[in-house]
Amino acid sequence: MSNPGAVITITIEIILIFAGLVFLWRVAVSPAARTHPAPLRLPAWDVAIPDFVSFLLLVLCGSMAAALAAGFAVKRLPLAGDAVTVFNGAAAQIGMLGGVAVYRFGIRGPRGAPPGPATGIFSSGVLTFLVSLPLLAVTSLAWQAFLKLCGLPAERQDLIGMFAHADSPLLLAVMIALAIVIAPIAEELVFRAGLFRYFRTRMPRWIALTVPALIFATLHVNWTTLDGFASLAPLTVLAVIFSLAYERTGRIGTSIVAHGLFNLNTILLIFSGVGV
């Protein structure tokens, strides 16, 4: 391999994967971890069905309204190509956050005990990210082999290609902010703090883990062209890992940090010339 940046990146990635294997053994696989599992600190979500439906509707309506507004704005702004896609995506994510905010501070209001101190969120997020790497590596290899066996497309997500070919510093900065800040916050609040937390005490655990994860993963696939289908299984596994980390720590900040680090890691792999 003639690209020094790619060599360095791959070396670092291998080190991170091995670190993830060590942590995975310590926190989940070792006899001590299985005999004395850590307590689950996530309390049940005391919310009635109408309130939960309101939450979902606010998120959906917020995302759709923001996307619609972005569509009108694009016609009046000097945007084209990838910039339009990024602008619409950012608007949809911000609209989701707006729906969550309206529910939390408007309809639902502050209830129950206030959250504890944020100590340990970053370290637990880093640990979650590291643990996810070896699991995702195995999942990606198996999924790619399955797709090739079935003759199905294994193309990268549109957004990954956009990062690789972005020619505007401003567009690149917006995409990075969207990937490592806005999207992790919006998606974790909706899929983990919303769907998973609601389902986990009302349905069998495997359903609570897999249904939000599958929804999360399918939204990252273009079902018209099947672009991004290669990410379906890895993203499903990633979402399950985030849910388990959230359940174990009781802090949504843990999965937000892990999500942001995962996206940052993907961006760095793209910039270094390593295929993802």
Image: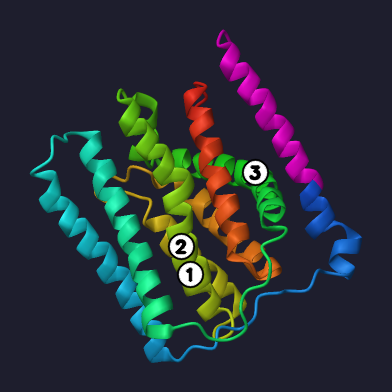
Going by the numbered disc 3, the residue's amino acid type is Leu
Residue at mark 3: 133
Going by the numbered disc 2, the residue's amino acid type is Leu
- The secondary structure type at the circle numbered 1 is helix
- As drawn, is 266 to the left or to the right of 155? right
- Label whose residue precedes the other's in the sequence (3 or 2): 3
Q: Which residue is painted at 69% across and 45% down in the image?
A: 130
Residue at mark 1: 211
Q: Nearer the viewer, residue 150 or 235?
A: 235
Residue 121 belongs to magenta span: no
- For the N terminus, the quadrant is top right
Residue at mark 2: 214
Q: Residues in magenta?
A: 1-22
Q: What is the number of the mark on residue 166?
A: none
Q: Nearer the viewer, residue 40 or 237?
A: 40
Mark 3 or 1: in front is 3
Say above or below: 220 vs 177.
Answer: below
- As drawn, is 90 to the left or to the right of 68? right
- The secondary structure type at the circle numbered 2 is helix
* Prevailing secondary structure of the magenta residues: helix
Going by the numbered disc 1, the residue's amino acid type is Val
Cβ–Cβ under 8 Å for marks 1 and 2: yes
